[in-house]
Image (cartoon, grey):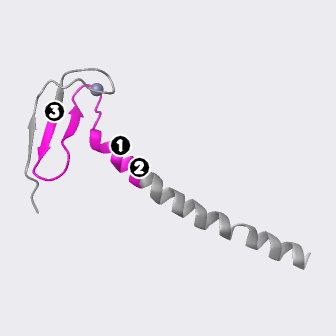
Amino acid sequence: MTFDAEGVNQQVPCPSCGSERTVTWMFDVGPDELECRDCGYRSDAASLRDLQRDAGDVLEGDGSEGLPAPTKVRSLKA
Ligand SMILES: [Zn+2]
């Protein structure tokens, strides 16, 4: 599996720190991604964070449902 990506400096201002020391990654498929050499900003990091947040919501929902059960069992026995 290979990534046909080419990083070029198009002097696009970083949306995070405003620096123009950025690298634009041009992909054959998908949107271009911006990487900042000064602050480490990456445009694809935001989309990755969204994916992780969505997964976290599902995990939190499953966990909260299981929590009350042991407490009820303990109170019935006491
Ligand atoms: Zn930056």
Secondary-structure class at tag 3: strand
Q: Are marks 1 and 2 in contact (CB under 8 Å)?
A: yes
On whether residue 48 falls in the magenta region, the answer is yes
Q: Residues within 10 Å of mark 1 (few under 14, many from 20)?
A: few
> Disc 2 versus disc 3: distance between alpha carbons?
22 Å
Q: Amino acid at mark 2?
A: Asp
Q: Residue furthest right?
A: 78
Q: Residues within 10 Å of mark 3 (few under 14, many from 20)?
A: many
The residue beneath circle 2 is 50
Eyeballing the image, is 69 above or below 37?
below
Query: Percent position (x, y) of residue 55?
Result: 46, 59
Q: Which quadrant of the picture is home to ligand 1? A: top left
Q: Amino acid at mark 1?
A: Ala
Q: Amino acid at mark 3?
A: Val
Mark 3 close to ligand 1, CB under 8 Å = no
Q: Are marks 2 and 3 in contact (CB under 8 Å)?
A: no
The residue beneath circle 3 is 23
Closer to us: 42 or 39: 42
Instruction: Describe residue 56's horizontal placement relative to residue 4 as left or right.
Output: right
On whether residue 53 falls in the magenta region, the answer is no
Query: Percent position (x, y) of residue 30?
Result: 19, 51
Query: Percent position (x, y) of residue 37?
Result: 21, 28
Query: What mark, if any, has residue 46 been given in the picture?
Result: 1
- Give the position of the N terminus as an image quadrant: bottom left
